[in-house]
Amino acid sequence: MALKYLLCVLLTYNMSLYCGSAAVHGHSIDNLERETDGSFRARDYEHYGDSGHNSEFDHEAILGSVREAEEFDKLSPDESKRRLGLLLPKMDLNGDEHIDRLELKKWILKSFINLSREEAQERLLEADEDHDGAVTWNEYLHDAFGVESEDEVGPEDTGDSGLILREEKAMWAAADANNDGKLELNEFQVFTNPEEHKEMHQFLINQTLREKDLNKDGSIDFNEYIGERGSQQDKVWLISEKDKFDNDLDLNKDGIIDLQEMHSWIIPDNEEIADEEVDHLFASADDDHDDLLSFEEILQHHDVFVGSEATDYGSDLMGEHFDDEL
Ligand SMILES: *[C@@H]1O[C@H](CO)[C@@H](O)[C@H](O)[C@H]1NC(C)=O
Ligand SMILES: *[C@@H]1O[C@H](CO)[C@@H](O)[C@H](O)[C@H]1NC(C)=O
């Protein structure tokens, strides 16, 4: 049991960052939210990891809530199926008792919004010390850096002499839409998930330029892209990074990552992730290949869409899966 719990914690922690903890939540300093190259982690980060396909992501994409996805994992298969059945009419926008690709995509995109809201809600609860439903700048400083005021944030906290804090403050001000000096949930959501809000993207581009564009020409060449990471890596790593740079990032093949390419590199595209998820769910459940998911097909494959105690990933790891089959 203890091991199972530990595994769940580790998995959740790596995957979706919803763990309540004393971890630092600042943007620039929160490496958990970034890939090592500096890009933001996509929602489906670790959907297909070293350990194969990870069904938690599918369940969250359908339920729009990590909390609810975990709740489903404890339900009997019948109850889980029954509750999934209640969602289907809500997904079925034209009421034909089939879910088409567009209906599913719209649902998944809404789920992403709900997930992001849930995440902000949990962070807000942690940071909102006086429980007034909003986070002040000082409450944020306390939560992110463990200090009472700005003067106490030193270079050892941010790794620079004040630049990161000024950036954070500028982002804070941009997120504070009604300018009242504190962030209510809607505003806090913009601040905590800047990659999902257009008005924040320029900040993220500027940050990336500051961190990587050493010759200040407004674009990133391969050496700048590699940066300090190169020193601890071998040739195989370098070759794979060069391949990624040339083929995935430098879209127009001019040898540099320009501003537009920087945008598609560091900011995950939820539309694209939703499209991939639709493809994956159709491949898993569209048994008669009519490019529609009937309610029956979805319920038949309920364990792809939502979890239950029979499909709980943690139990599988613990071998209970095998016990069931004996
Ligand atoms: C998102 O949240 C709203 C409000 O709680 C809920 O009505 C809706 O069903 C959720 N949608 C998805 C796709 O999870
Ligand atoms: C980004 O950097 C440019 C050039 O330094 C600056 O003019 C602009 O105000 C910055 N934008 C934001 C949102 O910080």
Image (cartoon, grey):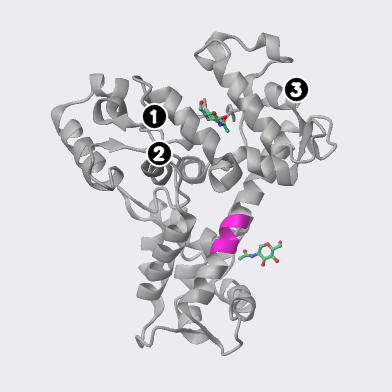
Under mark 2, the amino acid is Leu
| Span highlighted in magenta in the image | 109-113
Q: Residue at x 40, y 46 (%)?
A: 264
Q: Secondary structure at mark 1?
A: loop
Which residue position holds label 3?
Answer: 138
Which residue position holds label 2?
Answer: 259
Q: Residue at x 56, y 88 (%)?
A: 97
Residue 218 badge: 1
User: Where residue 178 sits: x, y (%)?
Assistant: 79, 40
Q: Secondary structure at mark 2?
A: helix
The CA distance from mark 2 to mark 3 is 33 Å
The CA distance from mark 3 to mark 1 is 34 Å
Mark 3, ligand 2, within 8 Å: the answer is: no
- Mark before the other along the chain sequence, 2 or 1: 1
Q: Are marks 2 and 1 in contact (CB under 8 Å)?
A: yes
Q: Residue at x 51, y 35 (%)?
A: 204
Left or right of 90 in this view: 304: left
Q: Nearer the viewer, residue 171 or 294?
A: 171
Under mark 3, the amino acid is Asn
- Mark before the other along the chain sequence, 3 or 1: 3
Under mark 1, the amino acid is Gly
